[in-house]
């Protein structure tokens, strides 16, 4: 009976998790309609949701082709960020001189506006994929590095004492204790990083591109086609949700023990 109760409670939590975003989306659309009706906003300034929906359907092939370009840039930038961030995080925690050398440089690069760097990438590498992927990488790698470093350092003293009692070497302690402890933090960084990677791809497309959703936004903006502009924004909204959910899904398989523990804590709070 106790197991059945937990199962029912877990289903209720999942229903609540999906229920609130749906209500928020419906509320946003109603507010959108309300602003248009109450303030009599012209269509060229703020198109109604139905008009945006019709453009999404009628221009689906155009939107999809540009969406694929943005997805490719986002994924490549995110993979590059992951490949670079993980070794840097490990090196920072393992070797103090490396931390003192590299961390100030990373912080400096993070404070530089990426909008100012993107034109340089366009000059150096042209209008292809490389500048967008690099901007995407620059936005995504830093939260991954910070989260993984935090996870490797935020380890309970009891676990370190356990490793000492087992006569584990420093490298064994690092591999068996610090890295597994950092995985939940790493996935937090990945979920933020994938969204920033998308933002970076769009930013790169703003600076100079002939394809992609960022280019389509600039195209619609120049022609004052606000309906198409809103259609692209809706596509970006759903794209961001999809890629974030995909990282969550991978997290559920990679560190299922942590996800189960998190859901159990939510269930206890809701009880």
Image (cartoon, rainbow, N blue to C red):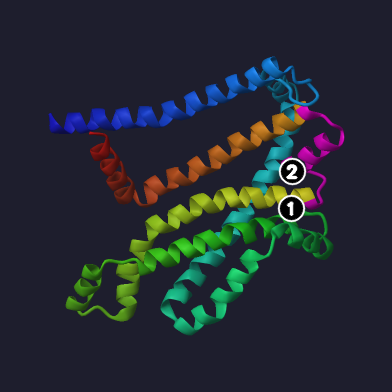
Disc 2/disc 1 C-alpha distance (Å): 8 Å
* Element under disc 2: helix
Question: Mark 2 or mark 1: which comes first in sequence?
Answer: 1
Q: Please check the rendered image and state whether residue 248 is part of the magenta-colored stretch, yes or no.
A: no
29 lies left or right of 215: left
Badge 2 density bin: few <14, some 14–19, many ≥20, Cα 10 Å: many
| Image x and y of residue 153, in percent | 37, 69
Q: Quadrant of the N terminus?
A: top left
Decide if residue 212 is in sight here. no
Which residue is outermost to the right?
223
| Image x and y of residue 134, in percent | 69, 60
The residue that mark 1 highlights is 204
Looking at the image, which residue is at 62% across and 58% down? 139
Q: Quadrant of the C terminus?
A: top left
Q: Contact, CB < 8 Å: mark 2 with mark 1?
A: yes
Looking at the image, which residue is at 76% across and 49% down? 205
| Image x and y of residue 57, in percent | 70, 22
The residue that mark 2 highlights is 214
Decide if residue 69 is in sight here. yes
Q: Is residue 106 above or below residue 193?
A: below
Q: Is residue 144 above or below residue 94?
A: above
Looking at the image, which residue is at 72% across and 50% down? 203
**Magenta part of the chain:** 207-226
* Element under disc 1: helix
74 lies left or right of 168: right
């Amino acid at each position: 009976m106790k197991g059945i109760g937990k199962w029912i409670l877990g289903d209720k939590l999942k229903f609540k998790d999906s229920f609130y975003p749906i209500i928020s989306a419906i509320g946003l659309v109603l507010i959108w309609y309300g602003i248009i009706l109450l303030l009599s906003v012209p269509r060229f300034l703020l198109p109604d949701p139905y008009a945006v929906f019709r453009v999404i359907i009628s221009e689906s092939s155009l939107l999809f082709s540009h969406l694929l370009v943005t997805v490719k840039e986002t994924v490549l930038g995110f993979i590059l960020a992951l490949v670079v961030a993980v070794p840097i995080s490990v090196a920072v925690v393992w070797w103090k001189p490396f931390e003192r050398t590299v961390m100030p440089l990373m912080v400096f690069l993070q404070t530089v506006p990426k909008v100012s760097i993107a034109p340089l990438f366009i000059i150096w590498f042209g209008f292809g994929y490389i500048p967008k992927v690099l901007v995407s990488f620059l936005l995504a790698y830093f939260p991954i590095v910070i989260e993984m470093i935090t996870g490797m350092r935020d380890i309970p003293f009891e676990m370190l004492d356990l490793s000492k009692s087992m006569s584990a070497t420093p490298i064994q302690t690092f591999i068996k204790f610090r890295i597994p402890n950092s995985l939940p933090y790493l996935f937090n960084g990945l979920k933020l990083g994938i969204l920033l990677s998308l933002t970076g791809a769009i930013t790169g497309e703003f600076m100079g591109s002939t394809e992609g959703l960022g280019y389509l936004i600039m195209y619609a903006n120049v022609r004052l086609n606000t309906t198409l502009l809103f259609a692209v924004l809706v596509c970006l909204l759903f794209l961001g949700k999809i890629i974030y959910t995909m990282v969550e899904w991978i997290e559920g398989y990679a560190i299922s023990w942590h996800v189960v523990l998190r859901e159990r804590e939510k269930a206890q709070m809701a009880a």
